[in-house]
Amino acid sequence: DSTEAAFTLHMVTWNVATADPPDDVTSLLHLNSPKSPDLYVIGLQEVYSGPLRFMSDVVFDDPWSHRLMSTLAPRNYIKVSSIRMQGLLLLFFSKLQHLPFIRDIQATYTRTGIFGYWGNKGGVSIRLSFYGHTLCFLNCHLAAHMKYATERVDEFEHIMNTQTFECKTAPRVVDHSLVFWFGDLNFRIQDHGMHFVRSCISNQTYNLLWSKDQLIMMKNKEEMLQEFEEGHLDFQPTYKFDLNSDTYDSSGKKRKPAWTDRILWRLRPKAPTTTDEHVETTETVKGARELEEDEEYPLKIRQDLYTSDMEYSVSDHKPVVGVFTLELRKMYETPLVHLQAEGDWSADIDAMVLYSPLQPFPSSTWDWIGLYKVYVSKEEIPVQGGECMLCYYSSTLRCIIGISEPFKVSNTVGAFTVCPNQSTDGCEITIILGPRIQGSHRGRPAA
């Protein structure tokens, strides 16, 4: 029987204004919090993408990804997916234990940049199923300046309407059970003068500014926006600050403070039921299926925190953090594959891993089993032995569908070969540790 469970999701959006990451991201990720989140989703805008840096980032992880990975990896988090389009970067991290239950992972991007800059504006997204529930995370950087509120909505709707995925149940963003829309959405506070805005910030009477926030105003007019929810803006506007300070723009431009950086979410609306029992269209069938699924496997969301982090001043924007609790009934809780290292593992002897399918899945000759060292950067995998684990990657499902318990490996080397063991009906794979093999090797499991 499926069980109800609650998961914590920690989200960050930050326009980093081409700055390198700060040395310490403890506050940003709430690492001192008594309860560590199950998932981290981090959306950045204006990551530096000058020619030299961007070319090196194509080959190696960019400094932001590297800083976040090196911080979260020792805490048992895995980077499940990431996507970058010029200055837009989206990262999805999960606790290791959830990895076999995160499936159908896809990422895509959409350029808008209608004001003449190629690729500098648009949206990047990651979609996946989490214990069977479809989630989509859309990180956007929309058009700047006060007068372009309508263009911002047009850009958002263009991104929503054009992004598609190779997924029968959720081919579009709106088909997902839960969508998060976040980023530097660039909406401003209109009509109010600078003095009034700043006095409201000083007095923490933020609610006096809400009615003139362009996103809140546009939500009253635009049907697509009305499906998205957002917590109260009970924190000071996150733009625009002098660098290395908490002082709003003191330059000649004196930009008016604004809540440019936002996190919204959308639970899939309940499908309308048709009153005509003789009319059965593709949409009504799909709607009925979604309704049945929603009732059998409910998904609820609660926002526990929505705030800015004033500790960081490397950018003219402050980061915004949203912490959520997802309550859901798991559609499955057994991995597709069970993996187990057999016997002693060292460079001197052939090593064996037992694997057994726990449920049917579309296996392929391109599936592979990888050996990973626990808690080290990928440049060190695996060097002088230590704690390792095995992961089964399904090329058809494009995700890891089984992980072993950690085990000790003595004096390992850079890679191994996977050979089928013919005498075991495809349930054993022999792993040979070869000292002369460099890099990673995709072995072919038994059919």
Image (cartoon, helix red, strand yellow):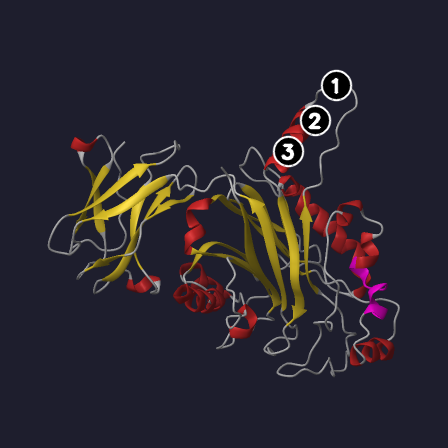
Question: Which quarter of the figure has residue 239?
Answer: bottom right
| Horizontal side, residue 386 vs residue 86: left or right | left
Q: Is residue 40 visible?
A: yes
The residue where tag 3 is placed is 290
Asked where in the image residue 8 lies, by quadrant, the reply is bottom right
The range drawn in magenta is 207-215
Residue at mark 3 to residue at mark 2: CA–CA distance: 10 Å
Tell whether label 2 touches label 1 (CB within 8 Å): yes
Point out which mark residue 284 bears: 2
**Tag 3 secondary structure:** helix
Q: Residues within 10 Å of mark 2 (few under 14, many from 20)?
A: some
Toward the left, the furthest residue is: 348
Q: Which residue is mark 1?
A: 279
Marks 3 and 2, the one that precedes in the sequence? 2
- Earlier in the chain: of badge 1 and badge 2, it is 1
Magenta segment includes 25: no
